Amino acid sequence: MRYLAPTTLDDAIQLLSGDPGDCRVLAGGTDLLVRLRSGDAEPDSILDIKRIEDLRQITKEDGGWLIGAAVSSAEMNEHAELKAAYPGVCEAADLIGSTQIQGRCTLAGNLCNASPAADSVPAMVAVRAVARVAGPNGTRDVAVEDIPTGPGKTSLEKGEFVASIFLPAKPDRSGDAYLRFIPRTEMDIAVVGCGLSLTLDNDGTCTDARVALGAVGPKVMLVDAAAEALIGTKLDDAAMQALSKACSDAATPIADKRGTVEFRTHVAGVLARRAAAIAKTRAEG
Amino acid sequence: MALDSKQVLDTQQFKIVGTRPLRPDGIDKVTGKARFGADITAPGMLIGKVLRSPHAHARIKSIDTSAAEAIEGVHAVVTRADFAEITDDDATADVLDNCMAGEKALYDGHAVAAVAASSGHIAKKALKAIKIDYEVLDHVTDVDRAIADGAPVLHEGRADESVPEGSSPNIMARYEFGHGDIDAGLAQADQVIERSYRTEATHQGYIEPHACLAQMSQDGQADLWCCTQGHYMVRNTCAAILGLDQGQLRVTASEIGGGFGGKTTVFLEPVALMLAKKSSRPVKMVMTRSEVLRATGPTASSSVDIRIGMTKDGRITAGFAELRYQGGAYPGSPVEMGSMSAFAPYDLENVKTVGWDVVTNRPKQAAYRAPGAPMAAFAVESAIDELAKGLGLDPLEVRLKNAAREGTKASYGPTYPAIGLEATLRTAKDHPHWTAPLGPNQGRGVACGFWFNFGGDTCVTLNITPDGTVTVSEGNPDIGGSRASMSMMAAEELGIPYNKVRTIVADTGSLGQNEVTDGSRVTFAVGLATIEAARAAKREMCRRVAKVWGIDEDAVEWRDGAVHPTGHNAGSHDPMTLAEIAAIASNTGGPIAGHHEANPEGAGVSFATHMVDTEVDPDTGAVKILRYTVFQDAGKAVHPAYVEGQFQGGATQGIGWALNEEYIYGEDGTLQNAGFLDYRIPVASDLPMIDTVILEIPNPGHPYGVRGVGETSIVPPLAAIANAVSEAAGVRMTDLPMSPPKVLKAMQDK
C-alpha cells in the first residue's frame, strides 16, 4: 500500500486522478482507518490531504465561510466567529464520535463517507452548504445534498475529491440547529438526525426554512414539506405540529439494530420540533 | 502467645484496615507502564490468528489447510484434528470444543482453525487461504424458541438425569429448590401476581481483549503468559487439553484490564500452546474487540415466569419462579444459581424455584459478576414491587416485613448466620434519597440483591526480608484491588506500615493450587490466608526471640510489631521489632516466612439494597439515571475506596444491562453488534455519581469480619431501574433492555 502526502492541491489532483488502482483520500481518517483495520477496505494507495495548507484553513468568503477539507471538528469548534455564525453546523460536528475523534474528523470526510447517519450532513444541508469539488477537469460547486447518493456511495467522479465546504452568507435573524437521537449521551451514531435552519422577519414570521433529516433514508433527506409547514407562520404550536408530521411522513427508515421503523419515524418529528425551537431562539438573537 | 485464628478484632482496634492508602498498581497503570496481556513479547515470536465460523450452526465436512501452509511465513496451522479427544471429562471436552470446533460450528464466531505466522498480515492472508466445506444447519438463538417443538437440536443425548423424559433435547439440566407448599401459600394471599420477564444476554465489557503468549520446548516444558482471572485454572485446563503434566506448564498472569467473570475460562490459550508446539516458536495471540464479543463468554439471556402471593399488609405468602436461561452452545448456564438466589433475600414459608438449562447457537457463556442472580432478582423484585404498589404499600416496608434475618431458612437450603439485609433496608429508609422530591416524568425504584460469596483453594506465602520489609505472594490476579488489601491485612497483623509490604501475584510454579478470582472470594479467602501466614511468621519470630533471650516460647508475646517478654518469669528484655528480628535471622535459624494453605468455609453471604431515580422522555422513551444510591453490607471494608468502587461498578454494569446493552442476533443467527459502538455500555456522561453507603455487619467466618463485596452490587440494579422506569413511564416494563424504542412503544400502547 502506498502512502501519498502532497503539499499542494494540484499535486493532490494529479496523484489521485493518475493513480491506476484504488486510491482513497485520507482527511481525519476516522472512518478510513477503521475500515483498513477491520479489513473492509484494502486500497492500493492512500492520499493524505492534511499537508495541503489551504485545506487546513477556515476563511471568510462572500460573507460566508469556507472550511478546508482537512479542518477538524475541534478546530471548527474553537473558531468563535464560525461558531457564532453556524452554531448548528458546529454542534453537529461536535457530536461526531468522541473528543479524540473530534480532534481528527472533518466535515468533508463525514460527507464523503456517505453514511445516512452522518451528523454534520443534515446540519450542512439545512444551511445550503456547498461542497467545492476538485478534480482533473477543474473545480465545481455541488450542493451538499447531491454528494451522497446512497449508503457509502457518492456522486464524485474518478479523480475528484471534496476540497472544502462553503457555508454561504445568511440573512439577519436566521438561526440553525442540529439534534440527533442516540440511546446514550455521547460516543454513538444517530438513530435519527435533524438539521434545521430558519429566518424570521421583524415581527417574528418565518420567511425561510430548510429541514434535513438523517438516518431515516438511504441518504440525507431535504424535506420541503417540513419547511413549508414553517414558512409564513409565527412558529406557533400548529406550525410545529405540522412540521413534526411532515418530517414523520417524509421519513423512510429501515429497522435495524439501532431502531425500529416506527421509532425512527416518530422521533424524526420530535427532533424537528425541538430543533425548530432552538433555531427560533437563535434567530431571535 | 494468644493467636486464636477465629478471633475477630473489634473495629476500633484496626490501625490500617479501613484506611485508604494509594494503590500499588496505580502509577504504572496511569503512566502506561503496566504490562497487560498484549504487552508480553518473546524473541522470535509468531503471531497467531483464529479463523471463525460465519455460520450460526454448521457441520464441518472438511477443512483444507494446504494452501495456507504453503504461504511463506506461515509456521503452523492448527485444527481440531491436532488435539487428542477428551473422553473422561465432559466439562473440559466442552472447553476444548469451544476453543476449536470439532464436528460442528455451533455459533457465529466459533473457532474452526488457527495459524501462526511471522506477521499478523501473513496470518490474516493464511486464514483466507483455509478452505472449509460447511453444511449449514438450521439454528436457534432464543431461549424459548430453543425448547419449542421442532427447534434445531444442538446436541443429541446430552441432557443429564435431572431432565424429565420427553423434554426438549436442548434442555441440558433441571434444578429445583425451595420448601413449603406453593398452592397453600397462594391460597392465603389477598393478591397474587403472575408475570413473565425477559432479559437479553450481556457481555462483561472488560476493556482488555484476551491475549496470551505461549512457548513450548521439545522436552514438554511450557510457559504461558496471559490475561486471566485465574492462571492456575489456565494451567490445569491447558495441561488437560494438551496432555501436559500440570507441573511442566508454568502460567504467569499479566495485569488484567477487567474480567468480571469473563476471564475465568480459556479461549486462546490451548490454541496458542498447540501452535507453539507445532511451530517450535513462541506464539502470541490477541483478540480483536469483535472476536471478544462474538466468541468469548457473555452471560445468559433469560425468560422467567413468576407467581407471588401477598397479604393486604404486605406479607409474602408464597413465591414461585420458573427460570429458563440459555448459556450458549454448551451446558452450564447459570440458571442453578439464579434458581438458588431468586428468593434468597426473603423469609418465606412457601417458596419454590425451578430452573432449566438451555443450549442455543450462541457463544458458550462465562461467569458474569454474580452469575445468574441479576436476572432472577429482576423478576422477583419487579413482581414484589408491583404487588406492593398495587396494595398501596411502601416497597421498602414490604421488603423489611419479609426480610431474611439471622436464623431464617434460606430458600436454597441453609439457615443464615448474622446477615445485613435488614440493615441495608433500614439505612435506605432513613437516607435523604428516599424522601427527596421527584419531578414530572420521574420515578424512584428500589430492589434488593443477594450473593453467596465463596472461599476456595488458596495459598499465600509471606516472606520477611533481611531489612525487615515483607513480601506477600498470592496466586490470584488482582482485579479489584487485592494487592493493596493483602498488604494492608499483612501490615495490620504484623504491626508495620503499609508501605513496608509489597504483594505480588505469583506464577503457577511458585505456589500450590489457587481457585480463580471469582465468587468475590479473594479479599475473604486470600485475606484470611494472608492473615494466617502473617500469624505463622509471628509465631516463628516469637520462637526466635525466645531462643535469643533464653526463655520459654510462652514467655514472649507479639504486640505492636515487636516481641515482648510476658509473665513474671520472662525477665527484663527490651522488645525486639520485626526489623531487628529480621536482621539477625540468619543467626537464629535462617530466613523467616509464614505460609497458609486452605479452602476456607464461611465466606459469608452479602446483601444490598439499591435506590434509583430515573426520568423518562415522554417523546422518545429515553431514560436518564438521575440519582443512584447503593446500600451494601461489606462485613468489614478493608480498603473502603475499593469497596465503593465495587459498589459503583456493579451498579454501572447493571444500568447498562437494564437500559441498552444486549446481544442482537440477525435472522441468520449472526451477531449484529460485535463492537462497542452498537453494544452500548454506559459512558461516563450517562451516569450520575453513584452514591454508596457501606454497612459493616462482621462475617464470623473471617478474622477481620470481611465478606466478599464484588458481585452483590450487580444483582439489584436491573429491578431497581425497572421499578423506577415503570413508575416514570406509567407502564410496567418486564423486558430488558429498556431501550428507547421499547419504552416509547410501551408508553404509546398503554
Image (tube, helix red, strand yellow):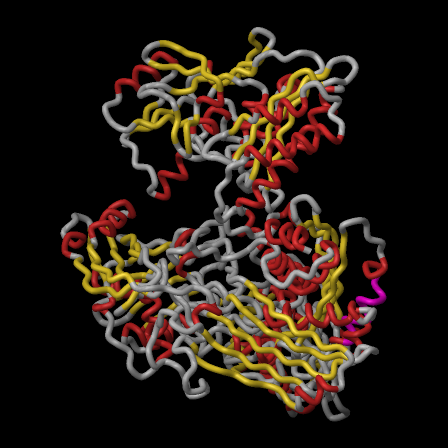
Image: magenta residue range: B422-431
| Dominant SS type (magenta) | helix
Note whether residue B36 is visible: no
Quadrant of the image for the C terminus of chain B? bottom right
Quick check: is A12 in the magenta stretch? no
Of B114 and B532, the residue lying toward us: B114
Res. B141 image quadrant: bottom left
Expressed as whole percent of the image width and height from the top left, the position of residue B143 reads 47, 68
Expressed as whole percent of the image width and height from the top left, the position of residue B733 reads 65, 60
Of B369 and B107, the residue lying toward us: B107
Quadrant of the image for the N terminus of chain B? bottom right
Q: Is residue B437 above or below residue B685?
A: below
Expressed as whole percent of the image width and height from the top left, the position of residue B63 reads 19, 61
Of B325 and B248, the residue lying toward us: B325
B741 vs B242, left or right, is: right
Res. B69 image quadrant: bottom left
Expressed as whole percent of the image width and height from the top left, the position of residue B238 reads 34, 71
